[in-house]
Image: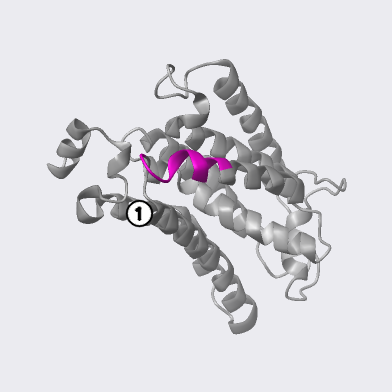
């Protein structure tokens, strides 16, 4: 039997406070912008940070309180999908959810945002997760499920559409970079779901499942970093001036 530790419950609320702090910094200051002379909404650094804030809010809805007023709803939804009993009898260890959320959205997403000045595609890595997650929630809504993250997934849709418009296409990053970002998001969700299936049905070690989640967001960042370097940066070259592109080719 698995019982929740206080941090399992509190982490979503802590993340919600973090989202509020980030939102104040994003909209009331210039600290998270690369160039205050241009619109926030066309600043890749700022967009990287707002994606992080949006996902912290999404986590709050999934693991704090959702649109239907249910507390800590998402773990129960995950257990119900394969027909597992609810907690405390669900066999999925609670640390699994911390490994997913704390690693990806408290650690990896801020690191990616910090790297976004020199690595714009890596900086937008959170949107690979956002795009696929939004599609999953929209599919669930078509089946009548509106709890556990649906409301903030609508915010994901708006942000995803805007980032695609603002960051990809002529004069910006290539659509090939966008395809790689989406593919990376698919891989993240596969690494999230497949070990759980193996754990539930074939006895994969819970330790292995948790360790895979600890590495999962960094795998996404690695894929996007390699994409940036592919063929001397052809996927992202339109985001840089001639000097920056020359430095990139020299390994600066």
Magenta segment's dominant SS is helix
Q: Where is residue 39 in the image (x, y as percent from the top left)?
A: 49, 23
Q: Where is residue 189 in the image (x, y as percent from the top left)?
A: 55, 63
Quadrant of the frame with the C terminus:
top left
Q: In this view, does 53 lie to the left or right of 167?
A: right
> Does 68 appear above or below 22?
below
Q: In this view, does 88 lie to the left or right of 153?
A: right
Residue at 57% across / 53% down in the picture?
131
Q: Is mark 1 on a helix, strand or loop?
A: helix
> Does 85 appear above or below 233?
below
Residue at 65% across / 27% down in the picture?
20
Magenta range is 162-171
Residue at 67% across / 67% down in the picture?
92
The residue singled out by tag 1 in the image is 222
Q: Position of residue 79 (x, y in %)?
A: 74, 67
Is residue 159 found inside the magenta-colored segment of the image? no
Regarding residue 87, the answer to whether it shows in the image is no
Please name whichever residue, 186 or 175, is drawn nearer the observer in this view of the structure.
175
Mark 1 is surrounded, within 10 Å at the Cα level, by few (under 14), some (14 to 19) or many (20 or more) other residues, namely some
Q: Where is residue 85 in the image (x, y as percent from the top left)?
A: 80, 71
Quadrant of the frame with the N terminus:
bottom right
Residue at 57% across / 46% down in the picture?
160
């Amino acid at each position: 039997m698995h019982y929740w530790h206080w941090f399992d419950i509190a982490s979503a609320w802590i993340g919600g406070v973090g989202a509020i702090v980030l939102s104040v910094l994003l909209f009331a200051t210039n600290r998270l912008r690369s160039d205050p002379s241009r619109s926030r909404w066309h600043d890749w650094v700022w967009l990287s940070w707002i994606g992080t804030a949006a996902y912290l809010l999404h986590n709050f809805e999934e693991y704090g309180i959702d649109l239907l007023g249910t507390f800590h709803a998402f773990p129960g939804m995950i257990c119900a999908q394969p027909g597992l009993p609810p907690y405390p009898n669900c066999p999925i260890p609670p640390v699994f959810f911390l490994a997913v959320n704390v690693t990806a959205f408290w650690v990896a997403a801020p690191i990616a945002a910090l790297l976004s000045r020199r690595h714009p595609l890596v900086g937008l890595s959170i949107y690979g997760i956002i795009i696929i997650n939004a599609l999953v929630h929209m599919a669930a809504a078509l089946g009548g499920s509106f709890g556990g993250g649906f409301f903030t997934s609508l915010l994901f849709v708006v942000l995803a559409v805007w980032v695609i418009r603002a960051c990809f296409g002529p004069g910006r990053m290539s659509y090939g970079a966008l395809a790689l970002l989406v593919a990376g998001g698919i891989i993240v969700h596969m690494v999230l779901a497949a070990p759980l299936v193996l754990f539930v049905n074939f006895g994969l070690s819970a330790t292995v499942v948790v360790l895979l989640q600890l590495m999962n967001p960094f795998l996404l960042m690695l894929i996007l970093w390699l994409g940036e370097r592919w063929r001397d940066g052809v996927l992202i070259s339109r985001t840089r001036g001639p000097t920056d592109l020359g430095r990139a080719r020299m390994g600066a």
